[in-house]
Structure formats: structure tokens, C-alpha cells
Image (cartoon, rainbow, N blue to C red):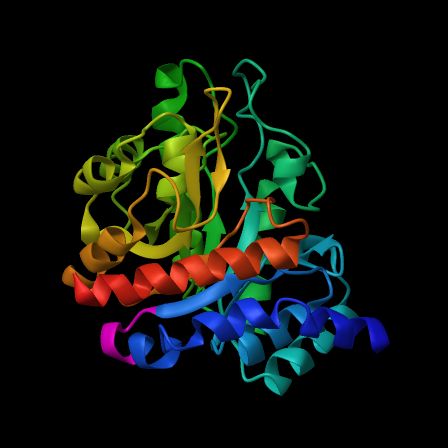
Amino acid sequence: MINLSRRRFVGAAVTTSAAHLFNARAFAAETKFKIGVISDEISQDFDHACYVIAKDFGLHYVELRELWGKNLQVISDAQIAEAQKILARYSLQVTDISSPLYKVNWPGAPISQYGTREDMHGADEVSFKHQNEVLDRSIALAKQFNTNKVRCFDFWRIDDVKPYRAAINETLQQASEHAAAHDIMLVLENEFACNTATGREAAATLAGIPSRNLALNWDPGNAVMRGELDAFPNGWDALPKDRIHHCHVKNAIKESDGKIGWSPVDKGYIDWAAQFRALAKVGYSDAINLETHWKGGGTPEQSTRISWAGMKTDLDQSRAG
């Protein structure tokens, strides 16, 4: 308890100093955005992460990926019950299950050079043949956590995906139809290590999959990391706006060595104030969840507090623009 209290005290100055700039609840009501945070970007201690999101950040939404150092795919029934109690304690709603669905190699294709163990966020590395189990587990978790969305991917990136693209699309089509039967929507994340990485690639993928139950988790930061430096506005402009039903908020910048690296939300290639305005203009009403990734704050929590302060500033500026 002493350590927990100390952690909650640390960083309070960041939260308090920016509080006068932006009222998250008022903004959410005005735009219909569901503003949240991926909990493990703050801490693997789920209670503490929820405390920060609800009490320090003043938010009502959380995205679930890892709890207590374990991916949701492998947590126990007892841990699910404990997580449900914690969510109720802080009056937090779950926006989606951030699953590792289809973060595997496509069978028959060359082994990808892009996926890493770190990218699995605590999930076991399982083969393509086990993905139906991952899908069903994710649907069950969505039901248990009272959300109607499951995040997915479209397999580790293949240098030449063309020979496999139609079959990948058919797999996503079938999975989305299966999820629809359970009243769950799949949101495909454009992920820099997967075959759909940029805004332009996401537009092409969605065009090839007729199911409206396969939507996009728009992540312009990931698009930048794959080299689409104009992810906003040009990558965004390519997207079918009515098929965007989730959004991750992070940023990337060119570092001193010339490489692209993660950065706080308000610094980097993505003009998030303009992106928030663009989302509001098209009537977007789903989640915009902070996924910090940047580690320059020293700890995950401090990095997220700094990024949240920048995100608040951009949200505030989006109303003034």
C-alpha cells in the first residue's frame, strides 16, 4: 500500500498542471468520443492502472490487453472476476478486447522478418491452426467484459503479400461473419509489423472485404512507423470513414539518427489536434484510446502521464481550431 500511494503521488503534478486546459468528460459529451487508455501502458497492476485512468485522468473507458503481466488470452477465471470488480470500483467501461488475433505467420508464405515476441504483449505464440480458438476466446472475453469489439490483425508482414492477399481477406471475412453471429465486431488494426500497416493499405484491405462487421482500428502512428509519413492527412483521406470504429492515439518522430521512433502524443508527424477535428467532423463516436508506446518518461506510467498531458492539449486545441 505504501508503494501504491507513492506511485499515485508521483506524477500528480503533471495531471494537475494540465487539468485547467481540458475537461475530458465535457469534451467526450461534446464530441461523442469515448476517451480511454490501454491499461497496461500505465501499469501491469490493473487496480493501479484503473485508479490512474479514472481518478487522475478523469476518464470512463479502458482497453484491455495485459493484466498482471498476462495477456487476456491466458488469464484465469479468478483474475477475470477480480478485473470485473476493479472495473466496477472505478466505474470504467471496456471499449474492446485488444486481442492478438491473426498476429501469426500466414501459412505457406515466407516466414516474416517483422514480428517479434515483444509485439505479442504477453500472449503465447500459437500457430495459424489455433486462431479459431483465439477468436472464440476473444469473443467470450468481450462478453464477460461487456464490450462489442475485438481488435485483430492480418498476419505478420510478407514482403510480397499479393499472392496471399485474397486468401487473407477471405479469412478475415469468415472471422467477421463468425463474430457477427455473436454480436461482436472485429476491428482490424493497421499495424506496422503486419500486412495492413498504413492508411492506404487499410483502404485497400477494407475494399477487399465486404463484411461491414470488419471495421478499422485507425492508428496513424503505426502508419508513420511503416513509412507513411503523411498518414494524416493523406493516409486518412484514403480511408472509408464509415468503417472506422476504433482509434489508437500515439505519435512518432524522426530521431537524431534519422530513424523513426515513438514520441509523446503532441510531438511528431501526426497533428493530433487536426486528426481529432477530422474525426469529429465525420461524426466519429467510438473510442480514442491512448497507447503510449513511447518510453522516454522513465517508466510506463510516467511516459503515459506525459503523453496524456499532450493528448489533452491536442484535444483542447482541436476545439479551438
Residue at x 69% of width, y 68% of height: 46
Q: Quadrant of residue 108?
A: top right
Q: Quadrant of residue 27?
A: bottom left
Q: Quadrant of the C terminus?
A: bottom left
Residue 244 screen position, x and y as percent? 28, 53
Residue at x 33% of width, y 51% of height: 215
**Residue segment shown in magenta:** 29-33
Q: Nearer the viewer, residue 293 or 32?
A: 293
Does residue 290 appear to the left or right of 272 in the view shown?
right
Residue 45 screen position, x and y as percent? 73, 65
Identify the residue at the far right of this view: 2
Residue at x 41% of width, y 52% of height: 249
Q: Quadrant of the N terminus?
A: bottom right
Residue 39 screen position, x and y as percent? 60, 62
Asked if residue 171 shows in the view, the reply is no
55 w.r.t. 175: above or below: below
Q: Nearer the viewer, residue 79 or 222?
A: 222
